[in-house]
Image (cartoon, rainbow, N blue to C red):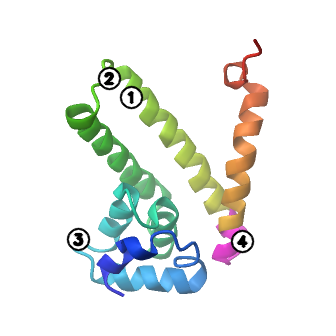
Amino acid sequence: MTPYDVFDPSVALDPTRFVGETGAARLMEAARHFPGGPAMLVFALFWAPIGPGIPAGVLLARHIPLSPLFTLGLYTLSDTLAAIVWLTTVLRVPRIPGWASAIAGDLVWFSLLLGTSIVAASLVDDDRVIGLAVIVAMILIPRIARRFVPALRDRES
């Protein structure tokens, strides 16, 4: 697999392409040939608007292995660069603090999901189980947050 096959739009919505050991092996093969190496492929996966995106980036980071802090740093960089692009080209956002808050919220969310994957990986070595744990966390974390943070609750009219 070439690095550019990872971002092939014709298979971008295939949910089975990068799961389990086979998916990790495909990503590792592509990473060996990616300009800048495996860490840059992780960054590209976080940055890319099409393709497997964040889940594949986290899976690859785990198998390289990259430290969770370095993985978070790559994600932070991709978020920050995306905000700069949006601020200077497409969107006219009047307040930078609003964008900084959006980035901070996204980083908290990413950190929770990355932490969930790290804890799950410490318990089991099956990427499918780790993925399922992250999906469950994606469903439960917002519900728990709404219970304890009144500002997140739906407002009754």
Residue lying at 28% horizontally and 44% vertically, measured from the top left: 81
Select label 3 or label 2 by which is in front: 2
Mark 2 = which residue?
96
Disc 3 to disc 4, how far (Cα)? 30 Å
Which circle marks residue 129 in the picture? 4
Q: In the figure, 86 relative to 149: above or below? A: below
Tag 4, which secondary structure?
Answer: helix
Mark 3 = which residue?
36
Tag 3, which secondary structure?
Answer: loop
Q: In the figure, 6 relative to 84: above or below? A: below
Q: Are marks 1 and 2 in contact (CB under 8 Å)?
A: yes
Mark 1 = which residue?
100
Disc 4 to disc 1, how far (Cα)? 33 Å
Earlier residue among tags 4 and 1: 1
Magenta highlight range: 120-130
Q: Are marks 4 and 1 in contact (CB under 8 Å)?
A: no
Q: In front here: 141 or 89? A: 89
Q: Label 3 sits on what residue type?
A: Gly
Membership of 123 in magenta stretch: yes
Residue lying at 32% horizontally and 23% vertically, measured from the top left: 96
Membership of 78 in magenta stretch: no
Disc 1 to disc 2, how far (Cα)? 6 Å
- For residue 41, side relative to residue 122 (left or right): left
